[in-house]
Image (cartoon, rainbow, N blue to C red):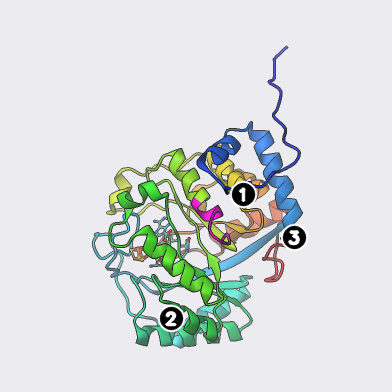
Amino acid sequence: MVSVPQSPAWAEPRQADSEGWTRAKAEALYGLPFSDLLFRAHTLHRRHFNPNGIQLSRLLSIKTGGCPEDCGYCSQSARYDTGVTATRLMDLDDVVAAAGRAKAEGATRFCMGAAWRNPKPRDLSRVAAMIAAVKALGLETCATLGMLTEPQAEELRAAGLDYYNHNVDTSPAYYGEIITTRTLQDRLETLAHARRAGLKLCCGGIVGLGETLADRLDMLVLLANLAAPPESVPLNLWNEVPGVPVAAQAERPDAIAFARLIAVARIMMPTSVLRLSAGRQYMSDEAQALCFFAGANSLFLGETLLTTRNAGEERDAALFTRLGLTALSPSEGANVGA
Ligand code: SAM
Ligand code: DTB
Ligand code: SF4
């Protein structure tokens, strides 16, 4: 007879105690037998969300390339030869037309991304007009424009912005290997400005940049220990970009390792919406299904993200049918039992 070791107690998901989440606690979760870990994460997931619902977002790059920052994974940094052509900020009408198409395709949130270190005053008022117009279509709004001051965040909020996306990207220890032109502290300050302005946070990072498992867990610890965890946590798998420094060292986790990470994120941030973000084009339907069971409940629709490929409409429609997934409305796309 094959001897199966006794499972550790799985039944009652526990929150972190008053000292918050630590690497050791995250490692203990990550190291659970796979079925115990997934059961525990899925139990929490069901407690807080409709487990068959999925939040659907659409991205649009409203200003592409030519970015002065040196993020070592990014196709839009002016420092690397990636083949991306820099553009000016899009016209309002074109953005509204794209948002209308996104709504028709089933998206409930429209995320506008600009390759800036930070927005200049004139740019900010133009983006504010875009936010107001997209909001008027009945979509939730999200923007990712680089660093923000608190008054800038307030201006965006007043225009109708719901979410601000600004990622920590990786662990505190690995951060300096990937980005040198702005610090993690700079990013945390922007997140604080967005929070104080009343914006919801969309904040996560990338997996597969050459970091260790400890780095991946430290990134989750950082996110989970924020004063209030982000309402939305995008977990990006590195999307291949030729010509950037990360390309030489990148290694995406396999499906089991990624599902474990999603499950740990679900347990550490039980009421946050977790997005399978960049990298779904590399994942099989089965791998995505595992991640949804582990607690992922959001994704980007469409053929492209900002500059790289996404899974695409046809494949996603078939996936949703195969898995019986239905779109979450904006109110359901927030948690149901916080
Ligand atoms: N410039 C803004 C900023 O950095 O906050 C907004 C746009 S930036 C492209 C948004 C996020 O996309 C990054 O923080 C990073 O997490 C993710 N990202 C960028 N390039 C990626 C890639 N090649 N693979 C996976 N994620 C990527
Ligand atoms: C996030 O965490 N992922 C999205 C969104 N926030 C802006 C961006 C993914 C970008 C992937 C690389 C590209 O398409 O250029
Ligand atoms: Fe610029 Fe954002 Fe790309 Fe960094 S991730 S290079 S800030 S567009």
Split into quadrants, the picture shows ligand 3 in the one at: bottom left
Q: Quarter-wise, where is residue 87 in the image?
A: bottom left
- For marks 1 and 2, give the one nearer the viewer: 1
- For marks 3 and 1, give the one nearer the viewer: 1
Q: 83 or 215, which is in the foreground?
A: 215
**Overall secondary structure of the magenta section:** loop
Which x, y percent locates residue 318? Answer: 65, 56
Tell me the distance, in whole angstroms, between the alpha carbons under discs 2 and 3: 32 Å
Tell me the distance, in whole angstroms, between the alpha carbons under discs 1 and 2: 34 Å
Please report whichever mark, 2 or 3, sits nearer to the chain's N-terminal start: 2
Using a 10 Å C-alpha cutoff, classify the residue at mark 1 as few (fewer than 14 neighbours), some (14 to 19) or many (20 or more): few
| Residue sitting at the far front | 18
Q: Provide the residue designation for mark 1.
A: 18
Q: 179 or 196, which is in the foreground?
A: 196
Which range is magenta? 222-229
Find out if the beta carbon at label 2 lies less than 8 Å from the nearest ligand 1 atom.
Answer: no
Residue 337 is labelled as 3
**Marks 1 & 2, CB-CB < 8 Å contact:** no
Using a 10 Å C-alpha cutoff, classify the residue at mark 2 as few (fewer than 14 neighbours), some (14 to 19) or many (20 or more): many
